[in-house]
Amino acid sequence: MEIKTVNSNKYNSQELASSIVKNSSKHTYYTISLLVDKNLVNSCFMAYAYFRWVDDVVDDSNKTPSEIITFITRQRKLIDLFYNGGKPDTISEKEMMLFHIINEDKEEDSFLQSYIRNFFAIIEFDSTRRNKIISEEKFAWYSQTLGKAVTDCIFYFIGNDYNYPESKRRYLAAEGAHITHMLRDYIDDINNNYFNIAKEFLDKYNIKPDSVDTQVFQQWVKDRVILARFYFKEGKKYINRLRCLRTKIAAHWYCIRFEVILDKIEKDRFLLRRKYSAHKKPPILFKMAWTAFKVSIKHLSVNVNNH
C-alpha cells in the first residue's frame, strides 16, 4: 500500500469522512446526523469512514495475503501509537481520520477505545479466517467481540455523558444482529471461502458448509434464528431501560435492519437465499419512523410516570 505524507487538517478529514459515509450508506449518514451528539457527529463520520476503508482494503481480492498482513499490522501499530500520543512520519488521508478521532479521546478505557480495538480485532480475525473452518468457541468470541464493539460505539457517540448501566443483557441485541448478519451473508461468504458455521456441527452431522438444502442444515438455521430472536428480545429489555431517547431509537433502528432479514429467512422455511435484496425504501423508512414514534411515546410515558 502506497503511503503518502499528508498535511490534512481536521476540517479536511471531516469533509472526506462525510462524503465517504454519504456515498456508502445514506441510512448511516442520516442516522449519524440525526441521533449522534452534535459535538461528536464529525468524529462519528470519521470513525465509520476509517473502518469502511480498512474493511474494503482487507476484502480486496487483488491484494495478496502478505499485503493484507502488512496493512493490518500497520493499522494496529497506528492505533497503539496514536493512543500513546505519537504520530508517524508518513500517513495517508484515511489514517489521518483515525489520528483525529483518537486525539480527541481523553478518557481512560473509554467506550471509543473499546469500539476501535474490538472492531479492529474483528476485521483482523476476518482477514485470517478465509479458507478455514472455525470452532464454536471462536464463533462465540466473534459475536461477543463484535457485539461489544457496536454497542460501545453507540454508547460513545450517543449520550456520551450518560452513565450506561452494567447488565448481562447489555450487548445481546448487537450479538443477535451479528448472528443474523452471518446468516444473511452465508452463501455469498462461501463463494469467497468464508465459512459461517462451526466445525463441531459439520463434523457431528458429516455435512459440508454448502449443504444448505439439507434438512439438518435448515434445522441449524432455524436454531440460529431462534437464538438471534432471543438475543434481540433480551437485549431490548436493556435498551428500553435507558434514559437517553436517542440511544433507544438508534438501537431499535439497528435491530430492525436485521430483524427484517430474520422475517425473510422464516418465510423461506430456513432455506437460505443466495442474495437478500436491499430493503425497499418506503416500507423500511415507514417501519423506522413508526418505531421511533413508539419508542418516543413509551419513553415519555415512563419519564412522566417516574415524576
Image: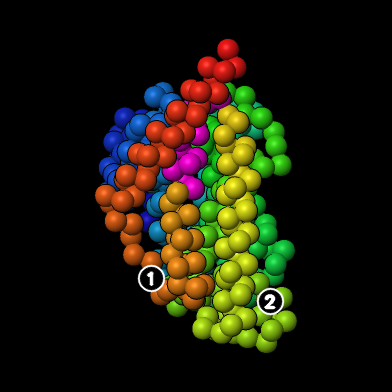
Q: In the shown orientation, is residue 57 left or right of residue 239?
A: left
The image quarter in which residue 292 lies:
top left
Q: Position of residue 54 (x, y in %)?
A: 44, 53
Residue toward you, 51 or 242:
242
Residue 230 in view of the camera: yes
Locate the C terminus by quadrant: top right
Secondary structure mostly taken by the magenta-highlighted segment of the chain? helix
Residue 85 in view of the camera: no
Q: Which residue shows up at 63% across the image and 86% down it?
A: 207
Q: Position of residue 79 (x, y in %)?
A: 55, 43
**Which residue is identified by label 2?**
201
Q: In the shown orientation, is residue 222 left or right of residue 252?
A: right
Locate the N terminus by quadrant: bottom left
Q: Which residue shows up at 62% across the image and 73% down it?
A: 220
Question: Which contiguous range is marked in magenta?
Answer: 243-255
Most distant residue in the top direction: 307
The magenta stretch spans residue 253: yes
The amino acid beneath tag 2 is: Phe
Q: Which residue shows up at 56% across the image and 84% down it?
A: 214
Q: Which mark is residue 275?
A: 1
The amino acid beneath tag 1 is: Lys
How was the colour assigned to the protein in this rendering? rainbow
